[in-house]
Amino acid sequence: MINPLQSLARRSLFLLDPETAHGLSIKALQSGLMPACAAPADLRLAQTVAGLEFANPLGMAAGYDKNAEVPEALLRIGFGFTEIGTVTPRPQAGNDRPRIFRLVEDNAVINRLGFNNAGHAAALARLQSVSRSAMIGVNIGANKDSADRIADYVAGIRTFSAVARYFTANISSPNTPGLRDLQGRESLSALLSAVLSARDAEAARTGKRVPVFLKIAPDLTEEGMDDIAAEAVSHGLDGLIVSNTTLSREGLRDQRQAQESGGLSGKPLFERSTIVLARMRRRVGPGMPIIGVGGVDSAETAAEKIRAGADLVQLYSCMVYEGPSLPGRIVRGLSSLCNREKLSSIRDIRDTRTDYWADRNV
């Protein structure tokens, strides 16, 4: 639960346009005035995933720090890792404002930002000054007007290989027309072949192999999930991120804001995204890493993602409502869960409820 001071700060921020409030939160992190609130290190929460060592399983999802302005500051408030972007080769303004909408009754957000970012060069310049030991992933995408979207993803691999701890190929945003078409089997095969070949070429050149994850949508059909799982396994992909925002508006209280176009995130996404996560775990088997995203707002929801089949979890939108102390609270809560359940590792609960979630109706 947020404290009275944070509650006052939230009410003040909620008087502002959401995008303005987001910019102020970035400035607060840049200023160094936001107190560190990381939980004490707990070896039971440490994870090795895709060959990388994570201090804890909780990450900040892409979308918050689009331009790599505050990655280390985010790690100081409790996250075990953070993901910058989505970044595109060339800067782009994104869609017209307003383009972010709070659904306060639902603890949800709708956005139609459209990959607004300052481009590869700006993000690279910032990341070059960041500690190489910091666990920072780079989420790469394609420009809206790109003549060759696969080439844009390849450019991201080549640009950031020296500074990224891992890559995420984001093909699941609903706010770039046609982007989700890359989830189709033939297109996905071509994308993965090109991206992983570029990664391997960079690894041969530098001696550093950077894992590549694929971020998918929660609105996939069963056939779509079959195709993605088959291509991910056959190409030797390092992992999946499940999931991006949804186009569904089912069960929302705020029917006025629900009419806005864009992707829905936050608390209402938890069930849908967790079902897709469990179904993808069934399809890819126990070995492929999965990062679970969508509706994580507590230690229990983070733990439930792990029970459904996630190795790591990420959040973003729920912090809009719960404040910057949320990551620290979640990490401390996971430590308490390990105490209660006498776990030697948080990984011990992985897959314990995969069948429960996979068998639920979306």
Image: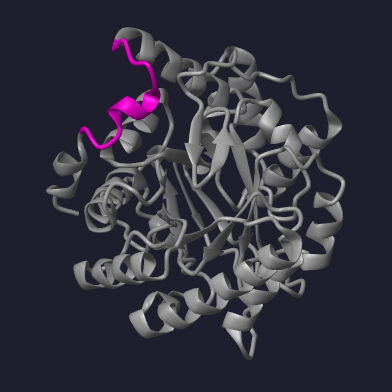
Residue 148 rendering spot, x and y as whole percentages: 61, 88
Query: Does the stretch in magenta take in 346?
Result: yes
Q: Main secondary structure of the magenta part?
A: loop
Residue 248 rendering spot, x and y as whole percentages: 32, 60
Q: Is residue 345 left or right of residue 41?
A: left
Query: Does the stretch in magenta take in 53?
Result: no
Q: Nearer the viewer, residue 90 or 103?
A: 90
Residue 143 is at least partly visible in this image: no
Query: Residue 283: which quarter of the image?
Result: bottom left
How many badges with numbers are in the image?
0
Q: Is residue 196 left or right of residue 224?
A: right
Q: Nearer the viewer, residue 125 or 26?
A: 125
Q: Nearer the viewer, residue 324 or 22?
A: 324
Query: What residue is rendered at 83% in x and 27% in y?
Result: 32
Query: What residue is rendered at 33% in x and 15% in y?
Result: 343
Farthest-out residue, bottom: 147
Q: Is residue 13 above or below residue 216?
A: above
Q: Is residue 79 above or below residue 311?
A: above
Q: Is residue 279 above or below residue 188?
A: above
Look at the image and tell me in which quarter the C terminus lies: bottom left
Q: Nearer the viewer, residue 39 or 192?
A: 192
Query: Residue 313: which quarter of the image?
Result: top left
Q: Is residue 122 left or right of residue 147?
A: right
Residue 331 rendering spot, x and y as whole percentages: 50, 22
Residue 180 is at least partly visible in this image: yes
Residue 64 rendering spot, x and y as whole percentages: 63, 48
Query: What residue is rendered at 35% in x and 25% in y?
Result: 300
Q: Which range of residues does the magenta coloring cover?
A: 341-352
* Colouring scheme, one of rainbow, by chain, secondary structure, one colour: one colour
